[in-house]
Amino acid sequence: MQENRIKLAVASLQISAVVFLLMVIVFQSLLGGINSLIPNLVTGFFLAFTILTAVLAFGLQRRKRWAWNVSVGLFALYVASGSVLLGAVGLWGLLDVGSRREFGVSDKPLLNI
C-alpha cells in the first residue's frame, strides 16, 4: 500500500499561515499609526487568510473531506499567483494516490502517462 503525502500539504499550509501572520505584523507596524479604512481592511484580509490556512491544516490532519477540497482550490490559487512553490508542494501532497485514498477520493491515476 502506498503511503500518503498529506504532511507535505499540512506543512505548506502551516508555512503559509506563518507568512500571512508575518505580513499582518509587518503591515501593522508600518501603517499602524494611520487611522484609515484601507490599512485595517488589508490587515483583516491577511488575518482572515492566516485563520483559514490554520483551520485547513487542522482539517487535513483530521482527514476531513471539506478541508481536502478547499485546500486543493487554495493550492491551485497559490500556483496561479506568486506562491508557486507552496502551491506545487501542497498539490503534490494532496493529489498523491495515497492521500486521495485517505480522503475517499478516487485512487485512479490522474494522468495516463
Image: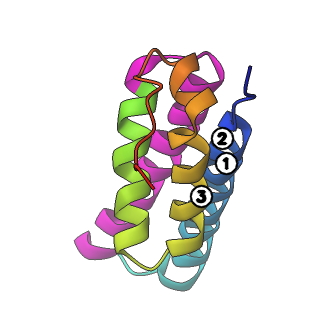
Magenta stretch secondary structure, dominant: helix
In x, y percent, where is residue 49?
44, 51
Q: Are marks 3 and 1 in contact (CB under 8 Å)?
A: yes
Q: CA distance from mark 3 to mark 1?
A: 5 Å
Left or right position of 37 against 78: left
Residue contact between numbered discs 2 and 1, judged by CB atoms under 8 Å: yes
Indicate the quadrant containing the C terminus: top left, top right, bottom left or bottom right.
bottom left
Query: Vertically, is 70 above or below 112?
Result: above
Asked whether, in this view, residue 70 is left or right of residue 113, the answer is left
User: Could you tell me the amino acid type at mark 1?
Assistant: Gln
* Residue identifier under label 1: 14
Q: What is the three-letter code of the residue carrying label 2? A: Val
The range drawn in magenta is: 37-66
For disc 3, the marked residue is 16
Q: Are the residues flagged by discs 2 and 3 in contact, CB closer than 8 Å?
A: no
Left or right: residue 41 compared with residue 59: left
Which amino acid lies under the numbered mark 3 shown in the image of this protein? Ser
Mark 2 Cα within 10 Å, few/some/many (few <14, many 20+)? many
Residue 89 in view in this figure: yes
Q: Quadrant of residue 94?
A: top right
Check disc 2 and report the residue beneath it. 10
Residue farthest to the left?
A: 37
Mark 2 and mark 3 lie on one chain; the one further toward the N terminus is 2
Outermost residue toward the bottom in this view:
30
